[in-house]
Amino acid sequence: QGAVLRLLLKILSSCSKVGDPHPGQPYKGGDFCAFLPDNKEGQKIAVLLRKAFALGLTFQIKSCNGEDKVTWGLIPHKTSWDGGRSRNGYPDRQYFHELCTVL
């Protein structure tokens, strides 16, 4: 296992906007963490993920059990360093290809 880039984000609770499930209603924020290998490919992907975040594409608001909350959006993230594809971690040989396709 080599060096790791760890992406940490804290999304604060706020009120939803037009296009969200319940515009003007409060939603719960959360803490999010994703992992990338700290190599040339991982650093390239980190730049793309930062652009996606700036464009508001990384997260979405979903309604669950009567509560609106922030969740990961359609862009796949590795939320575990290990455990493989089934645990949303590494190793996953197709991850960078799939991620680049989505981005």
Image: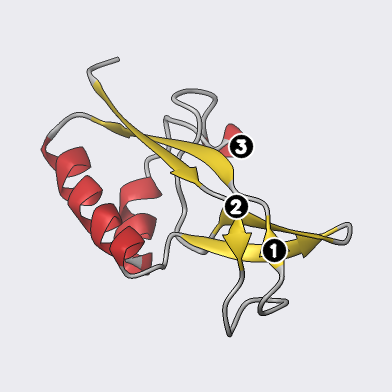
Q: How many marks?
A: 3
Farthest-out residue, right: 65
Quadrant of the image containing the N terminus: top left
Q: Are marks 3 and 2 in contact (CB under 8 Å)?
A: no
As drawn, is 39 to the left or to the right of 93? left
The quadrant where residue 34 appears: top left
- The residue that disc 2 covers is 13
Q: Earlier in the sequence, mark 3 or mark 1?
A: 1
Q: Are marks 1 and 2 in contact (CB under 8 Å)?
A: yes
Spot occupied by residue 52 in the image (x, y as percentages of width and height): 32, 63
- The residue that disc 1 covers is 26
- Of the pair 43 and 33, the residue shown nearer to us: 33
Residue flagged by tag 3: what amino acid is it?
A: Ser
Q: In this rendering, is residue 69 above or below 39?
A: below
3D distance between C-alphas at marks 3 and 2: 30 Å
Residue flagged by tag 1: what amino acid is it?
A: Pro
Q: Earlier in the sequence, mark 1 or mark 2?
A: 2
- The residue that disc 3 covers is 86
Q: Are marks 3 and 1 in contact (CB under 8 Å)?
A: no
Spot occupied by residue 84 in the image (x, y as percentages of width and height): 51, 30
Q: Earlier in the sequence, mark 3 or mark 2?
A: 2
Q: Which mark is residue 80?
A: none
3D distance between C-alphas at marks 3 and 1: 33 Å
As drawn, is 35 to the left or to the right of 33? left
Q: Which residue does the image show at 29% across and 54% down from the upper left?
A: 49
